[in-house]
Image (spheres, grey):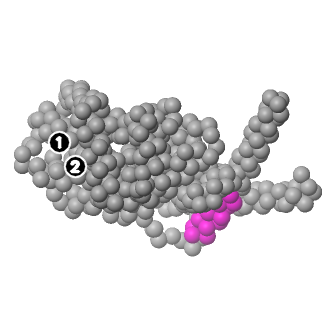
Amino acid sequence: MSARRSISRVAAESSVAVLLAAVVVAAALLAPREATMGDAQRIVYLHVPVAWLALLGFLAMAAGGACYLARRDLRFDHAAQAAGEVGWLGCTLTLVTGSLWAHEAWGAWWEWEPRLTSALVLWVISSGILLVRSTIDDPHRKARVAAVLAILGALDVPLVVLATRWFRGMHPVAPELDPSMRAALWISFLGLAALFAWLGECRRNQLRLGQHVAELARRSSALVGM
Amino acid sequence: MFADCCRIIHKDLVSEFRSRRAWPAMLLVGVVAALVFSLQMDLLPHEKPRLVGGLLWVSVFLAGAAVIERSVAGERDDGCWDGLRMMPIAPGALYVAKLAVNFLALLALGCLLLPLYFLLSDLPLLSHVRALASVALPACLGLAAVGTLAAALSAGNGRSGSLLLLVAMPLVFPVILAAAECTRLAAEDRFDDAWWRWMQLLWAFAIVFVTAGTLLFDYAIEE
């Protein structure tokens, strides 16, 4: 690895670490204690950003899939897979943190409420796409199947979001926030977005290198066979 | 395109009528699932409508999966798939034809299972026939649309049956959910605002999936 690349990598990782520290400070110290729920409300500073990032990851996976279908370049598939996996992580964290918040706010770990149900639907769809990937060996076939599924799954998203608007449930929708709470929410979003982008980039690089290794192994076995 | 679709639909229906290799098995699996679920549904009468919808549409999809999978894998096994692909027709037309046959199969299964579930659960059926038919149409269309595309994606894989369920199940989850809610509300005689909203959602899913399937089928059947 060249010196310039390793410097830029260390700089990116340091920036992510600083932003994550800012998230902790903003959520724990900058945001005031909420009157009704107390400190348990601070889960929101994790829950809301990861929910948005999960949705973005899902849409990025579909965009990567569409680019793969148009260009047939596996680099787009690697980006789509990385985005999908990071999106799945975000969706899982959304469900877990949402469940923790619901236990404090509603006294129940889970309610069959439209917004919770829609998050669960997205989690099931993204899990299905990742599972399908693991069952196919040929990289181009895997990329093609995953791309079609990601586009279909992304088409589900607006309908599911629409459903949550139609069926108003117990879940709070855009409540009035104190300015310092709003600032803490934005800092959390930026910090977690940086973390997710870094994770996605690491995974994309890993997939790219894995592809190189597979290609080298194929070439060396062909040479041995000659 | 319409004439091409009709020819493929006719071929598939005649082939199934002569061989009877997928539809009877589907109907039998559906009936057995309905009997087992209804036998286990030992609930108070007012609690039964809450379960019937979900069980009905899960049974329709799982029993129908065999027919949906055979709609593409059967063509490959019989050596017809290459011939179909070489026909001078748009891939979208091939998708619409396969979708139409799968839709008819699921509709036939729904027509059998819907009365069976309602009779076994002792729920009023005759007073809601039109409402239930209006639920069955978009629900079967949505399930068939996703299923047909998933069958094309999973065909050519050694484990196409299990892969079909893995591919399709998460995507049809919202369709099954909406159809189950519509059926529950109809069984409870509640044709209110919520029922219309779920119906709109069901139709929206069906239209989106049919359109997306027509556009993406070309990519799904690539070798």
The label number, if any, that marks residue A40 in the structure image: none
Q: Position of residue B76 (x, y in %)?
A: 44, 37
Q: Are the residues at dot 1 and dot 2 in contact (C-beta closer than 8 Å)?
A: yes
Same-chain status of marks 1 and 2: yes
At which x and y percent is residue B133? 17, 50
Left or right of A2 in this view: B149: left
Q: Residue, x 29% and y 50% (percent of image)?
A: B7
When the figure is inspected, residue A91 is found, relative to residue A138, above or below; the finding is below
Q: Of label 1 and label 2, which has the lower sequence position? A: 1
Image point (11%, 35%), residue name? B119
Residue where numbered disc 2 is placed:
B136
Which chain does tag 2 point to?
B
Nearest the viewer among A16 and A77 is A77
Does residue B120 lie above or below A78 as drawn? above
Give the secondary structure at mark 2. Answer: helix
Pinpoint residue A183: horizontal percent, then vertical percent: 61, 70
User: Which corner quadrant holds the C terminus of chain B?
Assistant: top right
Check if residue A182 falls in the magenta segment. Answer: yes
Pointer 1 chain = B
In-front residue for pair B124/B107:
B107
Q: Secondary structure at mark 1?
A: helix
- Residue pictured at 36% horizontal, 40% vertical: B71
Rate crowding at label 2 as few (under 14), some (14 to 19) or many (20 or more) other CA atoms within 10 Å: many
Left of B215 or right of it: where is A54? right
Residue positioned most to the bottom: A179
Question: Magenta residues?
Answer: A181-197
Q: Which residue is mark 1?
A: B111
B97 or A180, which is in the foreground?
B97
